[in-house]
Amino acid sequence: MKKEPSGNIFSDRISDVPRSFIRDILKLTADKSIISFAGGMPNRDLFPVKELGAAASKLFARSGKDILQYSTSEGYWELREWIAHRYKSVKGIGITPENVLITSGSQQGLDLLGKTFLDEGDGVIIEEPGYLGAIQAFSVYKSLFHPARVDMDGIDLERLKQALSDYPVKLYYAVPDFQNPSGISYCEENRRQAATLLEGRDTMLVEDDPYGELRFRGEAKSSFYKLIPGNTVLLGSFSKIVAPSFRIGWLVAAGEVMEKLVIAKQASDLHTNYIGQRIIYQYLKDNGIDSHIEKIRAAYGRQRDAMIAAMEAHFPAEVRYTRPEGGMFLWVTLPEGLPAMDVFKQSIGQKVAFVPGDPFYVNKKDVNTMRLNYSCVDEDTVHTGIKRLGGVLKKMISALQ
Ligand SMILES: Cc1ncc(COP(=O)(O)O)c(C=O)c1O
């Protein structure tokens, strides 16, 4: 029989990192008869399959030898130029291609930030609830988390101020637009006040923005990178606006911060998948992106509306939920004393899945919150699933009383 290594061969670094609970849940939802609001994936029916195929064929025919070679750690210049130009035209952020580092998804951006900034015990302010992938990425570097609540207006400014003055904090990790998991966006005033608190400090704000382009309602807000560029590293990704399998994202930084991040990138993987960068760039050059993003926004907007309408019709009045203006998720708060994990166990029996809130907190368990994803489920299925979930909630809430 093959002998496994003993437990103490592993580093403390990896032993203490929580396993991705969502990946475990997704295994459960592989059963096709389950209506899943659990995933965090973009809608596969919206992938530009034909256009990407055409871009790839063209490249192999014309530049096969080039696209198969090693490339630079910073990324394909033309793609970095395209990204810099888009920030200028869409968000009014004045950067150059030198400020853009292509990463293997924005998830790698988080890892590079951990490598570059965090020693064991260093402080990280994390949103509560917060993105599980960031909790996992920074946990590898044995950081000390200081959670700060997000509510309808954004980050809890009092808590932010207190954490910044009470602890040495190296990073503040934020998803200011259509946050994963809650769908909440920071309002303009909240951003400005948070920016004022951070400006000039030895703390970097990590502005993770994979969903900002997916706004189907309301007005765009100021990017932190525009407000306080010296204190911000901005992360972006093609995962939600083109396709995630390329694993192509980027980070925006300047000066010495960028120099150090490039060193971390070299040490990690030399460079991001070069064929993927070339295919995405060819696709963007031949097709543009605006009409494709418009299609995604319209579809997610309809699916979000269907979910809210079904919740209004079928959820008990005690249950509260966010009303996102973009992105892929909304956040449900159950009455006190009803753990979402218990609801999950019952709702799986009714063939409906979601993600209980627990993994989005760094120090809370048995929470009464849950994340629902609406990007992958058509409007009729949304209605059926929410009606079933509403039935489960009605029963469990009346049993509480
Ligand atoms: C807030 C947030 N950041 C980062 C990521 C990782 O995205 P990528 O596919 O670009 O690595 C996700 C993925 O769901 C996310 O929700």
Image (tube, rainbow, N blue to C red):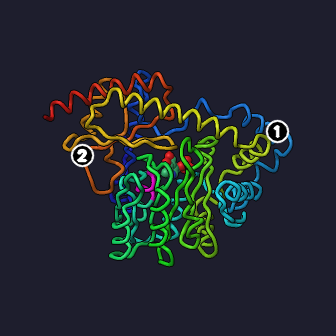
Foreground of the two, 202 or 293: 293
Q: Callout 2, which amino acid?
A: Asp
Quarter of the image where the C terminus is located: top left
Q: Residue 285: horizontal and vertical position, in percent?
A: 78, 45
**In the visual, does 354 lie left or right of 79?**
left
Point 63% across, 71% down: residue:
254
Q: Is residue 198 magenta?
A: no
Magenta-drawn segment = 133-137
Write down the residue under mark 2.
366
User: Quick one: which residue is furthest to the left in this view?
Assistant: 401
- Left or right: where 387 falls relative to 250: left
Instruction: Give the residue pinned by disc 1.
Output: 58
Q: Position of residue 65 (x, y in %)?
A: 82, 48
Of residues 53 and 64, the one nearer the viewer is: 53
Local SS, label 2: loop
Which residue is nearer to you in this view: 371 or 6?
Answer: 371
Direction from residue 285 to residue 135 in the image, left or right: left
The residue depicted at 53 percent of the width and 31 percent of the height is: 302
Looking at the picture, which amino acid does disc 1 mark? Answer: Lys
Single out the mark in the foreground, 1 or 2: 2
Q: Which of the 4 image quarters holds residue 90?
A: bottom right
Q: Main secondary structure of the magenta part?
A: helix
Q: Residues within 10 Å of mark 1 (few under 14, many from 20)?
A: some
Residue 365: give x, y in percent of width and height.
Answer: 25, 49
Residue 7, labelled with which disc? none
Q: How many marks?
A: 2
The residue that appears at 63% across and 35% down in the rendered structure is 295
Is the CB of mark 2 within 8 Å of ligand 1? Answer: no
Quarter holding residue 139: bottom left
Of the image marks 1 and 2, the number of the one nearer the N terminus: 1
Q: Quadrant of the N terminus?
A: top left
